[in-house]
Image (tube, rainbow, N blue to C red):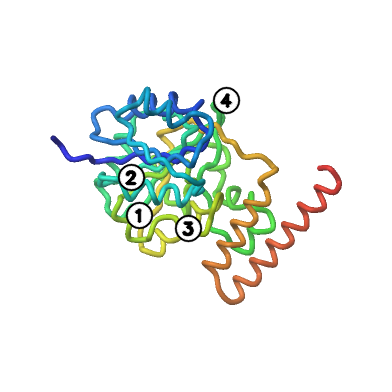
Amino acid sequence: MQPIELSVIIVNYNGMKYLNGCFGSLYAQLAGINFEIIVLDNDSKDGSCDHIKQNFKEVRLIESTENLGFGRGNNAAVEAANGKYLLLINNDTIVQDHLLPALEFMRNDESVGALGIRMLDGNGNYIVAAGKFPAPVNMIRLKNMFLMMGREFRSGNFTKPYYDVDWLGGSFLLMPKKVYDAVGGFDKDYFMYVEDVDLCKKVANAGYRRVFMPGLSYIHFVGFSRSRDSLVVAGHEMYIRKNMAGFTKITSLAALGINKLIKKVKRALGR
């Protein structure tokens, strides 16, 4: 029996309606690759665990008795992984292309610590899935982390097969397991949002590249809403406190404070 090369890691919380599509796409787009799927269920109440047990017996299911959040959930699942490489992928996704080119890219270049691909929304529209690391210049308006990536990233019209970037969205991250283990995985202090930026910062600090491949894509039924703005801001504040020092830290926190004030005013005005 050949050793498992790729461990697919999925953190699930009340996502039963997405599981058939997600699993089906993985089986199709990983054909020919020796892989396993590990699901960490964050104490779902929608029957997700029973659904997996009844319909996907080959999936390794870890049932948590509490909601560990995204980062801690991934960490717990990775502990059970046997693959040389990890694919961290959200439950509400459908992979559109065979992933062998991404895996081969990583096999052939050990300088790559994390790899992402093009993200589409449920209507097939391109969404930016990579960004610049937080800095004073992009904390007043968090969208600047995406806008500062350049015209190709803003439009989705790419001219190169791959791009080196600062960070990649956590809804699809291909990584060597040794890199994930070396940097300690996700920081457990994050519950939801910005933990992917923090992880990529640790990968960068360890000397590894973060690469975006636009020729492959996946659909992500993005569940973000403005009601979660406060969690995003809180995540960035935690990132700043953990990864910055001195004047950069002070000015970044000040810029983020302006961001929070602007959001507060907009809410008061009903915008």
Question: Which dot marks residue 180?
Answer: 1
59 or 102, which is in the foreground? 59
Q: Is residue 238 left or right of residue 269?
A: left
- Of badges 3 and 4, nearer the viewer stands 3
Report the quarter where the C terminus lies. top right
Tell me the residue that label 3 is attached to: 188
60 or 219, which is in the foreground? 60
Tell me the residue that label 2 is attached to: 86
Question: Which dot marks residue 105?
Answer: none
- Of badges 4 and 1, nearer the viewer stands 1
User: Are the residues at dot 1 and dot 3 in contact (C-beta closer than 8 Å)?
Assistant: no
- Of badges 2 and 4, nearer the viewer stands 2
Task: Report the residue that reaches farthest toward the front.
Answer: 65
SS for callout 4: loop
Badge 4: few (under 14), some or many (20 or more) residues near its Cα, within 10 Å?
Answer: few
Q: Residue at x 47, y 30 (%)?
A: 48
260 or 150, which is in the foreground? 260
Q: Residue at x 49, y 40 (%)?
A: 43
